[in-house]
Image (cartoon, grey):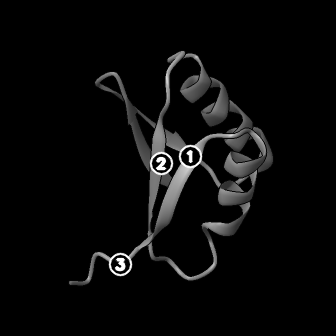
Amino acid sequence: MKLFEAAGVAFLVLNTRAEHEHLIEVLQAYGRPVVCAFEATGNYHRPIAWRLAEAKVLWAGPVDTAG
């Protein structure tokens, strides 16, 4: 599970297609460009990265936060 924060409101995004769709809807509701970044967590980012790319949401990652 990932914690996602939008406009000061935090909620969980599970790694499922339904949750990915909900996240994309939230991001697209901003009506302006949004960039998503991922922490390096093995291959767990691949499904959401694919869905974001399909939805034309910009993303960067995975990001290695280990330093």
Residue at 67 percent across and 55 percent down: it is 48
- Which one is earlier in the sequence, the residue at label 1 or at label 3? 1
Q: Quadrant of the C terminus?
A: bottom left
Depth order, front residue of 63/1: 63
Q: CA distance from mark 1 to mark 3?
A: 18 Å
- Where residue 42 sits, quadrant-wise, is bottom right
Q: Which residue is mark 2?
A: 36
Q: Position of residue 65 (x, y in %)?
A: 28, 75
Q: Are marks 1 and 2 in contact (CB under 8 Å)?
A: yes
Side (left or right) of 11 relative to 27: left
Q: Amino acid at mark 3?
A: Asp
Residue at 62 percent across and 40 percent down: it is 57
Q: Identify the element where label 1 is drawn.
A: strand
- Which one is earlier in the sequence, the residue at label 3 or at label 2? 2
Q: Which residue is mark 1?
A: 58
Q: Which residue is mark 3?
A: 64
- Which one is earlier in the sequence, the residue at label 1 or at label 2? 2
Q: CA distance from mark 1 to mark 2?
A: 6 Å
Q: Identify the element where label 2 is drawn.
A: strand
